[in-house]
Amino acid sequence: MEDELQLNDTRFFSLPRSQEDVTLRPRSLEGFIGQEKLREKLKIYMEAAKGRQEPLDHLLFYGPPGLGKTTLAGIIAHEMGGQLRITTGPALERAGDLAAIVSNIEPYDVLFIDEIHRLPAQVEEILYPAMEDFALHIVVGKGPLAKTICLSLPCFTLCGATTRLGLLTSPLRARFGIVEQLSLYLDSELAQIVLRAAEVLKIEIDPTAALEIARRARGTPRVALRLLRRVRDVAAVRGTGAVDADIAQRALDMLDIDSEGLDEGDRRILKTIVDLFGGGPVGLGTIAAALNEDTQTIEDIYEPYLIQKGLLERTPRGRKATPAAYEYLDKTPPQEGSEEIFLPFFEKGSCDENP
């Protein structure tokens, strides 16, 4: 029944999704590059749990997408002697969806729920006793004849992942014993990831080319690996198959990713703030309307890297371009005291609800 569920139920799937993805994912903490402090803490937590012969406490990972939350969940499952079970918050539409999944979990398995902040309230209610008491409460019948059946579950670890920690309800967040943030990677760490992936994929690559890819990868391993694949394509078609610094730079320029790691979307945001709104402060809703873009896309995908690069400032009154942004765009910053607050055109007379 378990195999049938994994194969046929789109709410529930297990790695691998592609053989190439599997080969690029490390299976142990020793093979995981970056997030050094987090790795050390997880190592201690897992050794302690093994010593007590208990499953690892429930974990919550948060941070920008592509930093290795799923990979870490797989490592935890492997080292704790269980299987990794993967689903997503939006896929669990009803309480029965979650019940079908947790009822098939084996001891020491890791249930990974991506985008856990999007879980419906009725699904959360089923999750609480499963997390605290390893029990599944099922209501049978309706009205005065309804009764609750309690089913015992094997000890397992729930690993939640989110890019928006603030959207989790307090009761759910409080039930995680381990809450850790994943941060953007250093260029040197990304270069190591690129070199390791190139070795696995049998790509001949120069260390300087790996560093060039790392510099333009926005501090994100997922982006670095995507760029490596595209550089590999250019090297195969326009070169000898080997990736050197020149091939890497030509490929990345073709992808419209500059030396700072910014793409056309980043530049559009900066130019909109500077050219249309005098550098800000300007509300997020106004920027999104001007770009015909979704506010969440700007906030989750573009802003973290722009802020890390010191090109964008998030203030209580809205987004503001920094002096470094003007230098990047080769423009002159406005004089101090001349800034104007730009409110959304659809909310005249009020502040942007998403500054």
Image: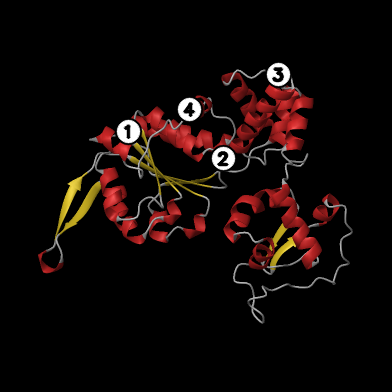
Q: Is residue 255 above or below residue 20?
A: below
Q: How dense is the environment of label 4, judged by Cα within 10 Å: few (below 14), some, or many (20 and up)?
A: few
**Residue positioned 11% across, 68% down in the render:** 144
SS state under label 2: loop
Q: Quadrant of the C terminus?
A: bottom right
Classify residue 316 as left or right of residue 7.
right
- In the rendered image, residue 242, in percent from the top left (x then y), is placed at 71, 18
Discs 3/1, front: 3
Q: Which mark is residue 15?
A: none
How far apart marks 2 and 3 lie (CA) works out to: 27 Å
Discs 2/4, front: 4
Q: Is residue 169 above or below residue 234?
A: below
Classify residue 67 as left or right of residue 286.
left
Residue denoted by label 3: 242
SS state under label 3: loop
Residue denoted by label 1: 52
Q: Quadrant of residue 354?
A: bottom right
Tag 2 near tag 4, CB within 8 Å: no
How far apart marks 1 and 2 lie (CA) works out to: 30 Å
**Residue positioned 77% across, 31% down in the render:** 249
Q: How dense is the environment of label 3, judged by Cα within 10 Å: few (below 14), some, or many (20 and up)?
A: some
Discs 1/4, front: 4
Q: Quadrant of the N terminus?
A: top left
Q: How many marks?
A: 4
In this view, the residue in front, 135 or 203, is 203
Residue denoted by label 4: 22
In this view, the residue in front, 35 or 332, is 332
Furthest toward the left, the residue is 145
Q: Amino acid at mark 3?
A: Ala
**Residue positioned 51% across, 59% down in the render:** 166
